[in-house]
Image: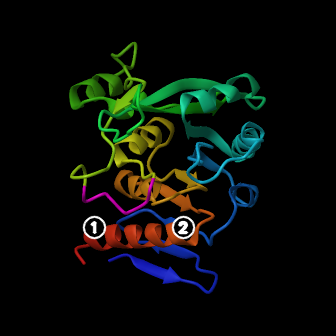
């Protein structure tokens, strides 16, 4: 069974010969976390969206741009979640040396919105990457395709679609995943980001980790993860989630 060490500053490290390392840092502001982080392979940014939940900021676009720049300083790949009308402001001002790889869309049919009119059914995610950064579409191949790829017989490597269809974790949907976090993303929309941008044992940083979805996804995919959030309540959810997964993985 994995050992979970708790330190006086609430830093938690989950390590085992059977699972990769997961480091859960003490609660901190996202810019503080990014500024003190070592280089990683991938950063996943999932900020609040300036829509009321989590508060609003008149300078939100400038604030988000600063966070993206800080993430690009330490990573090859950066994924930024948000609503399309929010993320569109970031496209013209990407950090130097980084390009937009793909505009991803998470499509969900089961939004419980009571707004009269168009009902929200999507979230967007920008995949930004440093010039020359590797991507790994081969991680999405089936066994037959992978054999052809390894034999050098595949001229073009087909990747996954840029639209990820997965329902929200609400009601009876994925009850085993639900943590009580108000904006929890399903594993199904985080795992493709990790698969496209990393290999086994690479490190993913999520400085606004919420309920710890990135951490569990990394455990399932044999990646390392560094997790943090400004909320001690959310970090507590993350800690319990990672510990529960580790116990189940090791038969405890």
Mark closest to the chain's N terminus, 1 or 2: 2
**Residue 187 position within the rendered picture, expressed as x and y whole percent measured from the top left:** 36, 48
Q: Are marks 1 and 2 in contact (CB under 8 Å)?
A: no
Q: Residue at x 37, y 26 (%)?
A: 160
Between 156 and 65, the one nearer to me in the picture? 65
Quick one: quadrant of the C terminus?
Answer: bottom left
Residue 195 is drawn in which quadrant? Answer: top left
Quadrant of the image containing the N terminus = bottom left
Q: Residue furthest bottom?
A: 8
Per the rendering, the mark at residue 38 is none
Position in image of residue 231 (x %, y %): 59, 67
Q: How is the image coloured?
A: rainbow
Could you classify mark 2 by the number of other residues whose Cα lies within 10 Å: few (under 14), some (14-19), or many (20 or more)?
Answer: many
91 and 9: which is toward the camera: 91
Which residue is drawn at the image coordinates 56% and 47% (left, top)?
A: 46
40 displayed left or right of 112: right
Which structural element holds mark 2?
Answer: strand
Q: Which residue is mark 2?
A: 23
Q: Is residue 8 magenta?
A: no
The answer to whether residue 148 shows anywhere in this view is: yes
Above or below, 183 against 231 in this view is above
Using the image, tell me which numbered label, if any, was put on residue 249.
1
Q: Is residue 181 located in the magenta-colored stretch of the structure?
A: yes
Q: Residue at x 32, y 59 (%)?
A: 178
**Residue at x 40%, y 38% (from the top left corner):** 192
Q: Is residue 242 left or right of residue 146?
A: right
Between the C-alphas of marks 1 and 2, the distance is 17 Å
Instruction: Give how far across and how far down residue 230 sits, in percent.
Output: 63, 64
**How many callouts does the rendering have?**
2
**Magenta-colored span:** 175-182
């Amino acid at each position: 069974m994995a050992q979970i060490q708790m330190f006086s500053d609430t830093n938690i490290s989950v390590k085992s010969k059977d699972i990769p390392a997961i480091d859960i840092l003490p609660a901190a502001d996202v810019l503080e976390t990014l500024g003190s982080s070592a280089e990683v392979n991938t950063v996943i940014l999932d900020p609040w969206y300036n829509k009321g939940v989590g508060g609003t900021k008149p300078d939100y676009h400038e604030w988000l741009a600063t966070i993206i720049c800080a993430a690009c300083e330490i990573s090859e790949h950066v994924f930024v979640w948000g609503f399309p009308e929010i993320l569109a402001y970031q496209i013209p001002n990407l950090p130097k040396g980084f390009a937009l790889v793909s505009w991803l869309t998470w499509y969900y049919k089961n939004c419980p919105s009571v707004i009269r009119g168009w009902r929200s059914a999507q979230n967007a995610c920008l995949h930004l990457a440093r010039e020359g950064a590797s991507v790994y579409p081969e991680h999405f191949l089936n066994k037959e395709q992978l054999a052809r790829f390894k034999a050098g017989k595949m001229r073009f490597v087909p990747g996954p679609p840029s639209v990820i269809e997965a329902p929200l974790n609400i009601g009876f949907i994925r009850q085993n995943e639900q943590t009580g976090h108000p904006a929890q993303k399903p594993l199904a929309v985080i795992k493709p980001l990790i698969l496209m941008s990393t290999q086994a044992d690479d490190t993913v940083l999520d400085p606004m980790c919420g309920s710890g979805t990135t951490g569990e996804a990394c455990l399932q995919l044999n990646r390392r993860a560094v997790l943090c959030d400004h909320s001690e309540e959310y970090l507590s959810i993350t800690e319990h989630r990672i510990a529960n997964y580790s116990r189940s993985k090791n038969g405890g």
